[in-house]
Amino acid sequence: MRAVIQRVKRAKVEVDGVTVGSVEKGFLVLLGVMDGDTEKEAEILAGKTAKLRIFEDENGKMNLSLTDAGGGALVVSQFTLCADVKKGNRPSFTPSAAPAEAERLYEYYMECLKNEGVSGIAHGKFGADMQVTLTNDGPVTILFDSETWKNSKLN
């Protein structure tokens, strides 16, 4: 799984001009599911997302997690995060999971976020053409790639 996590003051996602998900203070999570990803990657990523300490404490230090700060999460599926651009100039999307499996793990990731104590979870519409609007706070943007922990002690 690959995720781009942005600390936001607000974010929303629209489909056909209609807002389908929004969040105030919290995270915008762009999530790409790779071929071969499992529930284990979703569980680890959700745990890391919920516990990621990038909100400022009373001393102005990035020391609070999403749950500590009482923020929400807007989760948007984005298969283009799985693109392979090693050859040529046109990305290949073969590394991404098949749509049915990607949607299942996308939904499971959100369920895991809820189990980690994240309230206010909103989402886009899987597979739709979406327009995302956000006010990035900081800006603070963190990249996660499950490949970095597949062979580590997190397994």
Image: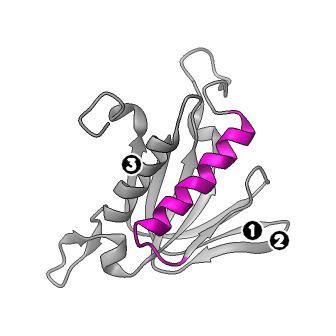
Real-space Cα separation, disc 1 to disc 2, in angstroms = 6 Å
Q: Which residue is mark 1?
A: 14
Q: Is residue 9 left or right of residue 82?
A: left
Task: Classify mark 1: residues with Cα within 10 Å, few (<14), some (14-19) or many (20+).
Answer: some
Q: Which mark is residue 115?
A: none
First in sequence: mark 3 or mark 2?
A: 2
Crowding at dot 2, Cα within 10 Å, few <14 / some 14-19 / many 20+, comes out as few
Q: Predominant secondary structure in magenta?
A: helix
Query: x%, y% of residue 13?
Result: 68, 67
Q: Amino acid at mark 2?
A: Gly
Q: Which residues are magenta?
A: 98-120
Secondary structure state at the residue bearing disc 2:
loop
Q: Is residue 94 magenta?
A: no
Snapshot quadrant of residue 111: bottom right
Residue corresponding to mark 2: 17
- Taking the view exactly as shown, the residue that stands out farthest to the left is 59
Q: Amino acid at mark 1?
A: Glu
**Residue of label 3:** 44
Identify which residue is drawn at 31% across, 27% down. Answer: 151
Instruction: Give left or right: position of 47 versus 27.
Output: left
Q: Quadrant of the C terminus?
A: top left
The reply to whether callout 1 and callout 2 are in contact (CB within 8 Å) is yes
The residue sitting at 65% across, 26% down in the picture is: 91
The x and y percentages for residue 129 are: 79, 54
Q: Quadrant of residue 71?
A: bottom left
